[in-house]
Amino acid sequence: MNCYQEIGVTYISGEDGKKNCGHLKEFYEKPGGRESFWDCELYTDYKSEYRIAVKECKESDIVEIDTFNELKALDKAYDV
């Protein structure tokens, strides 16, 4: 099993999440499945069953957050 994936975030709908639960069990029982990222099966065995889109990010889109104070500075919702 080979699932190359760049660093990123995977978002799935509630409907696809329910479908994905069954696929994950099948996927993890295959050789190499347990060593793969959870969303690898979306891009391999079950690709035709999901609508997959890629949004490329620029380096400036990435922000490292190491502390809660840094998070609060970026998102005022945490500043309570």
Image: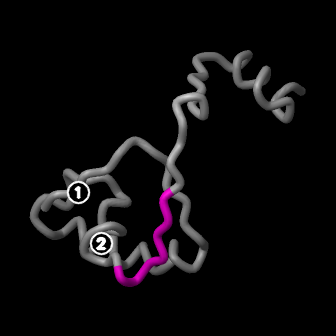
- Range covered by the magenta-colored residues: 48-54
x, y percentage for residue 22? Answer: 37, 78
Question: Which badge, 1 or 2, is on the more N-terminal residue?
Answer: 1
Using the rendered view, name the quadrant where residue 12 is placed. Answer: bottom right
Residue neighbourhood size for the residue with mark 1, other residues' Cα within 10 Å, grouped as few (<14), some (14–19), many (≥20): some
Residue at the limit of the structure toward the bottom, as seen here? 49
Q: Is residue 72 above or below residue 38?
A: above
- Number of other residues with Cα within 10 Å of mark 2, as a class: few under 14, some 14 to 19, many 20 or more: few
Indicate the position of residue 55 as horizontal and vertical percent values: 53, 54
18 with respect to 72 (left or right): left
69 relative to 56 in the view: left or right: right
Q: State the SS at label 2.
A: helix
The x, y position of residue 62, in whole percent, is 56, 31
Q: Main secondary structure of the magenta part?
A: loop
Q: Which residue is mark 2?
A: 25
Give me the disc on residue 3.
1
From this view, report whether residue 43 is shown above or below residue 19.
Answer: above
Along the line of sight, the residue nearer the viewer: 67 or 48: 48
Label 1 vs label 2, nearer the camera: 1
Report the residue at 26% width, 69% height from top.
44
